[in-house]
């Protein structure tokens, strides 16, 4: 039953990504050419939601589904590794036209050619 709940959340997330056009390679192309604010707005909205969520977890001492305490720890920032990883991630995003999360939404929308990108990423 727990898996069904997470499947529903995943479906909802996929619908949000699709309806907000975050899976549209046209929108992603506009973003990389600095022609539109649309995708930057979506990313900014995700950052705001993340900040609010982390704040609520810390203030309300929320627990996991299994009742364990959520421990949020900082990680050291490795400039070389983060920069190299960011460049590789950005190149892959630009080439494929989607970052890893929306790949599943695209697959669920019937874009079977995205399987090539998914298999290549593994």
Image (cartoon, rainbow, N blue to C red):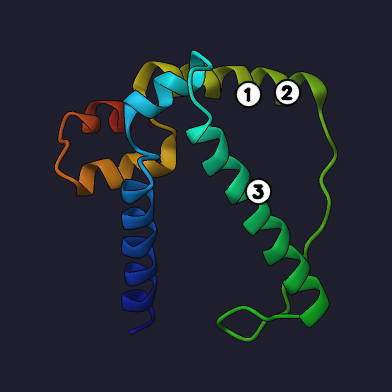
CA distance separating discs 1 and 2? 6 Å
Front label number (1 vs 3) = 3
Q: Earlier in the sequence, mark 3 or mark 2?
A: 3
Q: Which residue is mark 1?
A: 85
In contact (CB < 8 Å): disc 3 and disc 2? no
Position of the N terminus, as image quadrant, is: bottom left
Residue 81 circle label: 2
Q: Helix or strand or loop: what does disc 1 sit on?
A: helix
Snapshot quadrant of residue 114 = top left
Tag 2, which secondary structure?
helix
Question: Which class describes the residues within 10 Å of circle 1: few (<14), some (14-19), or many (20+)?
Answer: few
Q: Residue at x 39, y 30 (%)?
A: 98
Mark found first going from the N terminus, 1 or 3? 3
Badge 3 marks a residue whose secondary structure is helix
Q: Residue at x 62, y 43 (%)?
A: 44
User: Which one is nearer the viewer's eye here, 14 or 20?
Assistant: 20
> Counting other residues with Cα less than 10 Å from the Cα at mark 2, is it few (<14), some (14-19), or many (20 or more)?
few
Q: Which mark is residue 13?
A: none
- On-image quarter of the C terminus: top left
Number of marks in the image? 3
**Position of 37 relative to 21 (above/below):** above
Say the numbered circle drawn on residue 47: 3
Tell me where residue 58 appears, x and y as whole percent.
80, 72
Mark 3 neighbour density, 10 Å: few (under 14) some (14–19) many (20 or more): few
Please tell me whether residue 63 is drawn above or below residue 106 in the rendered image: below
Question: Which sits in the foreground, 18 or 65?
Answer: 18
Where residue 10 sits in the image (x, y, percent)? Answer: 37, 62
Q: Residue at x 54, y 21 (%)?
A: 90
Q: Residue 116: image x %, image y %?
A: 24, 26
């Amino acid at each position: 039953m727990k898996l069904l709940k997470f499947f529903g959340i995943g479906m909802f997330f996929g619908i949000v990504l699709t309806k907000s056009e975050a899976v549209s390679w046209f929108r992603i192309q506009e973003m990389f050419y600095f022609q539109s604010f649309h995708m930057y707005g979506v990313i900014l909205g995700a950052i705001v939601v993340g900040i609010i969520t982390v704040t609520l977890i810390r203030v309300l001492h929320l627990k996991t589904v299994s009742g364990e305490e959520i421990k949020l720890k900082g990680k050291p920032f490795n400039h070389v590794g983060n920069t190299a990883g960011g460049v590789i991630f950005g190149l892959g995003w630009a080439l494929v036209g989607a970052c890893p999360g929306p790949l599943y939404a695209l697959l669920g929308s019937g874009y079977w050619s995205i399987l090539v990108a998914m298999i290549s990423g593994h």
